[in-house]
């Protein structure tokens, strides 16, 4: 299943074993994969100008939904012409959903984040104000921010979680995936699903199959670098990545893994 959102395309141009070289076409130009995606947390890559980032060869930058929705605010960014204009970045952009921040804030301070079937509620680290983030609200906010690629809201369990906790996170992420796909989003914005499952390869494979059956434009491997041993993470990546749909782009924590 290739990307279905108008303005997007994905073409594999070479393979070597499980590795791929491909071209991801977006409304803001092509991204040749594999590629490193610099993190522009608040709309810019720290210490670098947009020109310097582009000179490195990067053609896609990640923006952080949690931070941008709090400051300067998604509505402000929309009024300024969207994240591309706000960041003065003419190439492709991707925004995360805020799910990882829900994990990191809850582990860093358990009183900051609460979760339910509806979504996450959290206190701003800036002023303590309360906010709610549901699958639909994550799509709406990312729509206002205006990056080329949105990520679905997901549940990211700690790396040392019991199997039952991971299974519940996988199941809820799938339910939230369907809600995200059903939510209205602006034309010209792709939506990627996120495969969870911690380091339990059977859960990763099963979840990859579930999300591959849904009309996402791409798929990500989420829920890594959350406390599991690095060697185990690498082992799981090697075993799980081949189960992602080969006709769609694959994204892993700042990397388009091809």
Image (cartoon, helix red, strand yellow):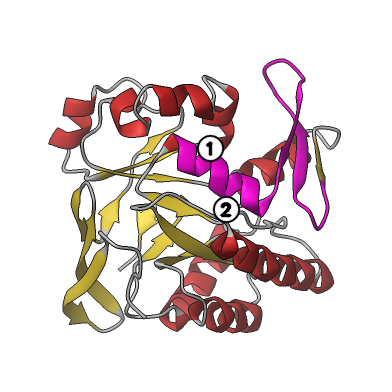
In the image, 219: left or right of 248? Answer: right
Q: 10 Å neighbourhood of mark 1: few (<14), some, or many (≥20)? A: many
Residue at 25% across / 25% down in the picture? Answer: 88
Which range of residues does the magenta coloring cover? 115-144
Query: Where is residue 207 shown, x and y percent of the image?
Result: 60, 78
Labels 1 and 2 touching (C-beta < 8 A):
no
Give the position of the N terminus as an image quadrant: bottom left
Residue at 35% across / 64% down in the picture? Answer: 5
Vertically, is 182 above or below 65? Answer: below
Front in this rendered view, residue 242 or 170: 170
Identify residue for label 1.
65
Q: Most extreme residue toward the right, as rendered? A: 111
Q: Is residue 79 magenta?
A: no
Q: 10 Å neighbourhood of mark 2: few (<14), some, or many (≥20)? A: few
Query: Is residue 26 in sight in this rendering?
Result: yes
The kind of secondary structure element at disc 2 is: loop
Q: Which label's residue is closer to the chain start, 1 or 2?
A: 1
Q: Nearer the viewer, mark 1 or mark 2?
A: 1
Q: Quadrant of residue 51?
A: top left
Residue at 34% across / 48% down in the picture? Answer: 148
Identify residue for label 2.
225
In the image, 111: left or right of 71? Answer: right
CA separation, marks 1 and 2? 19 Å
Query: Where is residue 104 shown, x and y percent of the image?
Result: 68, 41
Query: Where is residue 200 shown, x and y percent of the image?
Result: 66, 76
Residue at 72% across / 15% down in the picture? Answer: 127
């Amino acid at each position: 299943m290739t990307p279905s959102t108008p303005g997007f395309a994905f073409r594999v141009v070479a393979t070597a074993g499980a590795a791929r070289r491909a071209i991801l076409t977006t409304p803001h130009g092509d991204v040749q994969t594999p590629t490193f995606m610099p993190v522009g947390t608040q709309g810019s890559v720290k210490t670098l100008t947009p020109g310097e980032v582009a000179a490195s060869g990067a053609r896609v930058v990640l923006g952080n939904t949690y931070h941008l929705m709090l400051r300067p605010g998604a509505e402000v960014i929309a009024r300024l012409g969207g994240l591309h204009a706000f960041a003065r970045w003419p190439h492709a952009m991707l925004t995360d959903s805020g799910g990882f921040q829900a994990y990191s804030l809850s582990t860093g301070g358990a009183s900051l984040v609460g979760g339910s079937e509806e979504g996450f509620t959290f206190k701003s680290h800036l002023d303590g104000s309360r906010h709610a983030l549901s699958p639909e609200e994550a799509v709406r906010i990312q729509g206002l921010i205006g990056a080329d690629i949105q990520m679905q809201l997901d549940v990211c369990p700690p790396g040392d979680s019991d199997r039952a906790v991971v299974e519940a996170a996988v199941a809820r992420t799938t339910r939230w995936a369907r809600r995200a796909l059903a939510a209205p989003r602006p034309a010209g914005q792709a939506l990627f699903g996120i495969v969870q499952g911690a380091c339990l390869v059977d859960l990763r494979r099963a979840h990859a199959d579930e999300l591959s059956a849904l009309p996402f434009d791409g798929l990500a491997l989420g829920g890594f670098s959350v406390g599991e041993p690095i060697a185990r993470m690498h082992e799981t990546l090697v075993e799980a990545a081949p189960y992602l749909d080969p006709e769609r782009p694959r994204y892993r924590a700042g990397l388009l893994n091809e």
